[in-house]
Amino acid sequence: MDSTYSKVKTGIPGLDSVISGGMKSGRAVTVSGPPGSGKTTFGLQYLYSGATDFDEPGVYITMAQNIEEVKNDCKSYGWDFDNLISQDKILMIDARPFKIHDDTIGKDDSLYRGEQLPFEHLTKLLLSSIKRIEAKRIVIDSITILAMQYHDKFYMRQGLQGMLQALENFGVTSLLLSEYSENDEIPLEWFVTSGIIQLRHTRVEDTMERTIQILKMRGIKHSEQIHPINLDSDGLHLLHPRLMP
Ligand SMILES: Nc1ncnc2c1ncn2[C@@H]1O[C@H](COP(=O)(O)OP(=O)(O)O)[C@@H](O)[C@H]1O
Ligand SMILES: [Mg+2]
């Protein structure tokens, strides 16, 4: 087994052991799943663990929820992001297309000069944020909302590939959170990222079960099983992690 590459731990207990010890440093991985499957939790746990356990600062960019709400929801997991932000270990960026100011909804002109957020702007914003705190980890929540802005698939693909290349050049390991339910069209990010982690939240008889499966992880020996997971007051963890043979 090739163990010469540097590994980035996900911080999800049990997960690193089924991906040969961690993700490849400098790569981008898609985390997909339906609403409520734990994508945002996964992303924030990755950043929180990076900042607290591995001395790897991280940037979280949200296109969905406002930052106060995100930080507040994290309290149910016992994660104090304000403390990490004050130490420049975490940076949270609100890049939603619409924001509410004084009870009116307006576009954020600093980013959205036209109808779409140009990839060049987003990439520049990410790179300057990375430099500011010497980030090693990035989470984009979500790439689906970003993609909705573009009608031109070619532009989206070129833009996304350019952005991922720039992030790779900076040596950061990124997670792209992606809304995907079974039977949906395969999203673009599945093709352009080096890994895909699929979260599922499905009905089994009269209850709901959560699972995780590694669909792709380029250059890494990984489990192909569907692993049951738990989401509780400590965040996400695999229930019966097995070491790779
Ligand atoms: N402290 C907690 N303990 C257990 N489950 C929680 C806790 N906080 C949130 N959840 C669960 O996590 C779900 C939200 O997960 P989230 O990461 O936001 O999913 P997604 O981003 O995929 O929509 C909630 O619907 C709830 O079921
Ligand atoms: Mg979410």
Image (cartoon, rainbow, N blue to C red):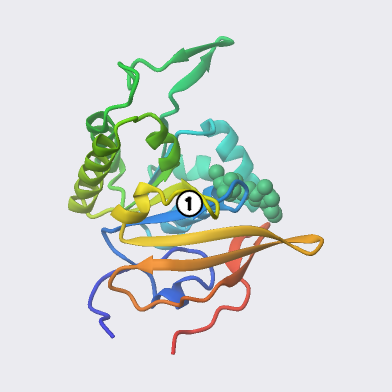
Screen quadrant of the N terminus: bottom left
Screen quadrant of the C terminus: bottom left
**Residue pushed farthest bottom?**
245
- In the image, is residue 102 above or below residue 8? above
Dot 1 falls on a residue whose secondary structure is helix
Residue 111, quarter of picture = top left
Residue 197, quarter of picture = bottom left
Which residue is found at the position 29% from the left and 32% from the top?
152
Q: Position of residue 71 (x, y in %)?
A: 56, 39
Q: Can see residue 128?
A: no
User: Residue beneath label 1, please?
Assistant: 43
Q: Dot 1, crowdedness within 10 Å: few (<14), some or many (≥20)?
A: many
Q: Amino acid at mark 1?
A: Gly
Q: Position of residue 77 (x, y in %)?
A: 63, 52
Between 100 and 36, the one nearer to me in the picture:
36
- In the image, is residue 4 above or below residue 117? below
Q: Position of residue 150 (x, y in %)?
A: 34, 30
Which residue is found at the position 43% from the left and 67% from the top?
215
**Residue pushed farthest right?**
206
Between 40 and 137, the one nearer to me in the picture:
40
